[in-house]
Amino acid sequence: MIGLGNRESGYTQAIQEDIEVLAVAIVEAIKKKRAEILINDLNKELLQRTSELSAANKELESFSYSVAHDLLAPLLAIDGFSNIILEDYRDRLDDEGRRLFGVVRENAKKMGQLIDDILSFSHMGRLEMSMQEIVMEQLVKEVYQELATSAPERKIQFNLKSLAPAYGDRPMIRQVIANLISNTLKFTKGREATVIEVGTITGEMENGGIGKAGKNENIYNMSKTTV
């Protein structure tokens, strides 16, 4: 380029064509170098984000384990003392009292299962998911009954349709369902009446207005109406 730029004689057509070819090659080389620099910068940023995410996951695992471990001791005490009262003071309790203590013990057992799930979650970074067949109707009903007990004064109609079974990690699927139902109850609070309906769109069905299931897949949908 320096030689061509300092050329004392004129430029022939051939020289001009060579300059154009050289200019295009230089531009392409510059573009390629810029792309390499950009890719390297993005790779460095990705490695940094990955490192930060790994550190955050470790903190979350530690926190989940700590919370679950701290909850376990008082929960065992609740279950144990409830059982003692039922056994030693059964004659002093009426039917309603015995029923209520039974409810306490049953919910303590459910809470124990939730704590086990949290402990499993705290080790998910090191353990593989436990894949199994899930009876979705039973799981959804169980989760709803637990959450509904926190709002006995509310008028809620829960319509659970026939649900196809699923295959996956039960604690994780359970948490997803709990989040969905919990949000539904939360955002319909203050309404006179609420209707919650849970159903399935199977892979044999066409577009059902809210999504389309693929082959060998199910879509579990939840809808709500309020008054």
Image (cartoon, rainbow, N blue to C red):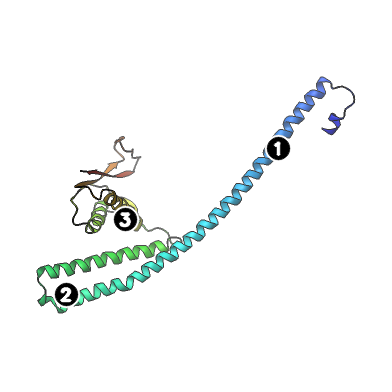
Is residue 74 among what the camera can see? Answer: yes
Question: Along the polypeptide, which appears first: circle 3 or circle 2?
Answer: 2
* Residue 139 vertical placement versus 202 (above, below): below
Residue located at (62% from left, 45% from top): 39
Q: What amino acid is found at the position of numbered circle 3 in the picture?
A: Arg
The disc label shown at residue 86, or none: 2
- Amino acid bearing label 1: Ile
Label 3: which secondary element: helix
Instruction: Name which residue lies at 9% across and 71% down.
Output: 94
Q: Amino acid at mark 2?
A: Leu
Q: Earlier in the sequence, mark 2 or mark 1?
A: 1
Disc number placed over residue 177 in the picture, else none: none
Looking at the rendering, which quadrant does residue 23 occupy? Answer: top right
User: Residue reaching furthest bottom?
Assistant: 88
The residue wearing badge 3 is 174
Query: Which is nearer the N-term, disc 3 or disc 1?
Result: 1
Question: Which image quadrant: the C terminus?
Answer: top left
Name the mark nearer the viewer: 3 or 2. 2
Whole-percent x, y for residue 137 in the image: 24, 51
Residues under labels 2 and 1: Cα distance? 82 Å
Q: Nearer the viewer, residue 189 or 157?
A: 189
Q: Say the numbered circle drawn on residue 30.
A: 1
Marks 3/1 in contact by CB < 8 Å: the verdict is: no
In-image side of 108 versus 176 (left or right): left
